[in-house]
Image: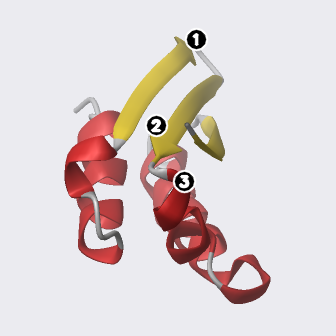
Amino acid sequence: MAVNYESLIQHLIEPLVVHPGDIEVKVLSDDDQLVTVQVLVHEDDLGRVIGKNGRIANAIRTIAYASASRQNKKISIQIDAF
C-alpha cells in the first residue's frame, strides 16, 4: 500500500500554523529507495513548524521515517518559508 507523503505531512503541519492555507507540500522525487519532500510554509509559521531546537521538525520527520520504512524507503524533508 502506497503512502501519500504529501497528505501525511500536510495533516501533521496544519494544526501547528496560523496560516494553514499557505502550506505547500511537494514530493520532489520518489524513486525506489529515497523520497524527497519539500515543505513551504508562511514566513510567520516557520518557527512553529521547526520548533525550539528543531524538536517539532524532528518529530514530523520521525513519523514520516516510520511510514517510509514500512516500504523499505528513506525520506528527506526540507522545510522552508516563502
Q: Which mark is residue 71?
A: 2
| Image quadrant occupied by the N terminus | top left
Which element type, helix, strand or loop, lies under badge 3? helix
The residue that label 3 is drawn on is 43
The residue under the point 24% across, 74% down is 15
Disc 3 marks which amino acid? Glu
Q: Label 2 neighbourhood size at 10 Å, few (<14), some (14-19), many (20+)?
A: few
The residue that label 1 is drawn on is 31
Residue 37 on image: x %, y % = 54, 32
| Image quadrant occupied by the C terminus | top right
Q: Earlier in the sequence, mark 2 or mark 3?
A: 3
Which element type, helix, strand or loop, lies under badge 1? loop
Q: Earlier in the sequence, mark 1 or mark 3?
A: 1
Q: Nearer the viewer, residue 21 or 63?
A: 21
Q: Earlier in the sequence, mark 1 or mark 2?
A: 1
Which element type, helix, strand or loop, lies under badge 2? loop
Image depth: mark 1 or mark 2 in front: 1
Q: How is the image coloured?
A: secondary structure
Q: Quadrant of residue 17?
A: bottom left
The residue under the point 79% across, 84% down is 53
Residue 44 on image: x %, y % = 50, 63
Residue 42 on image: x %, y % = 45, 50
Give the distance between the C-alpha atoms of the residues marked 1 and 2, in whole angstroms. 12 Å
Disc 2 marks which amino acid? Gln
Give the distance between the C-alpha atoms of the residues marked 1 and 3, in whole angstroms. 30 Å
